[in-house]
């Protein structure tokens, strides 16, 4: 399986009560990208909304060598979530929600004539702007070139780890699309426990159970090779 949305099953699930579709660009467990173009076409043909959850992928996909259609270039995409606090490297909890048309944001407006602004689009009034400021600061600091450099290095390390895993007879469940690598090892839960005794704390996917690694920029080639050595030893 490709671990991404099956467009015909999405179509089968649409009925007269369906107001919108959601596609994920950079899934949490597999880093996979749903077929957003097909979802966009479907949303347009049914005249419903399409939200793209690019919480993780929003700050990865634009900087990959391969190009994927996932954003407002597709006319059916009506909103996108992209989290600066994930691969945008800003502080938690900065999140981003983008609308194709500002009128969608106005639908969320709450009248607040008793405040300095007459209307706002969130339920909480007074709140910290620190995380938004952190996101702005990182965008200015890194720029597109900075994100590109970081994402491409993460992808290089991801592919290198795939190659090392294959040397030990371990296959990834999918060829990594983003910097999430899921390795198909027999009895993943025990492999994970043994790795933990060696100081490696890895996550695990739910179905199937497999080792899940997110190759973030703080990782070094040297450490990933040490990890690959231990993994080879544990599964042999
Ligand atoms: C695809 C995806 N969507 C949403 C979330 C949740 O993100 P938030 O931090 O905005 O709650 C995650 C977190 O892992 C994610 O991977």
Image (tube, rainbow, N blue to C red):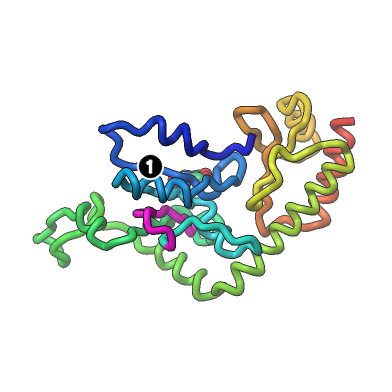
Q: Nearer the viewer, residue 40 or 210?
A: 40
The structure residue drawn at horizontal position 25% and vertical position 57%, both measured from the top left corner, is: 105
Q: Is residue 29 left or right of residue 223?
A: left
x then y, percent, for residue 77: 38, 54
State the quadrant of the N terminus: top right
Q: What residue is drawn where x is 38% and y is 58%?
A: 75
Write down the residue under mark 1.
21
Given residues 182 and 120, the one toward you in this image is 182
Q: Nearer the viewer, residue 96 or 77?
A: 77
Q: Main secondary structure of the magenta part?
A: loop
Query: Under tag 1, what secondary structure?
Result: strand
Q: Position of residue 202 (x, y in %)?
A: 69, 38
Residue 123: image location, x then y, percent: 23, 49
Q: Is ligand 1 less than 8 Å from the beta carbon at label 1?
A: no
Is any atom of residue 70 visible in this view?
Answer: yes
Image quarter (top left, top right, bottom left or bottom right) of the C terminus: top right
Total numbered badges shown on the rendered structure: 1
Q: Is residue 131 visible?
A: no
Residue 29, x across and y down, in percent: 59, 39
Q: Residue at x 82, y 42 (%)?
A: 165
Which quadrant of the figure has residue 15?
top left
Crowding near the residue tagged with mark 1, few <14, some 14–19, many ≥20 C-alpha atoms within 10 Å: some
What segment carries the magenta color? Answer: 73-84
Q: Is residue 54 left or right of residue 195?
A: left
């Amino acid at each position: 399986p490709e671990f991404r949305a099956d467009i015909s099953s999405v179509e089968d699930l649409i009925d007269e009560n369906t107001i919108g579709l959601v596609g994920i660009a950079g899934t949490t467990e597999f880093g996979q990208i749903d077929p957003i173009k097909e979802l966009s076409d479907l949303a347009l043909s049914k005249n419903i909304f399409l939200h793209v959850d690019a919480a993780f992928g929003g700050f990865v996909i634009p900087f990959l060598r391969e190009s994927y259609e996932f954003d407002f270039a597709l006319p059916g995409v009506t909103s996108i979530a992209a989290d600066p606090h994930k691969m945008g490297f800003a502080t938690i909890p900065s999140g981003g929600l983008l609308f194709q048309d500002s009128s969608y944001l106005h639908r969320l407006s709450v009248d607040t004539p008793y405040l300095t602004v007459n209307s706002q689009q969130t339920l909480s009034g007074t709140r910290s702007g620190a995380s938004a400021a952190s996101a702005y600061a990182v965008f200015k600091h890194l720029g597109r070139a900075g994100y590109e450099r970081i994402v491409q290095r993460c992808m290089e390390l991801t592919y290198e780890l795939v190659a090392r895993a294959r040397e030990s007879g371990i296959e990834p469940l999918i060829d990594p699309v983003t910097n999430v690598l899921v390795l198909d090892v027999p009895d993943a839960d025990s492999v994970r426990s043994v790795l933990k005794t060696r100081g490696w704390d890895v996550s695990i996917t739910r179905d199937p159970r497999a080792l899940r690694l997110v190759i973030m920029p703080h990782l070094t080639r040297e450490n990933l090779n040490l990890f690959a050595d231990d993994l080879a030893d544990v599964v042999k």
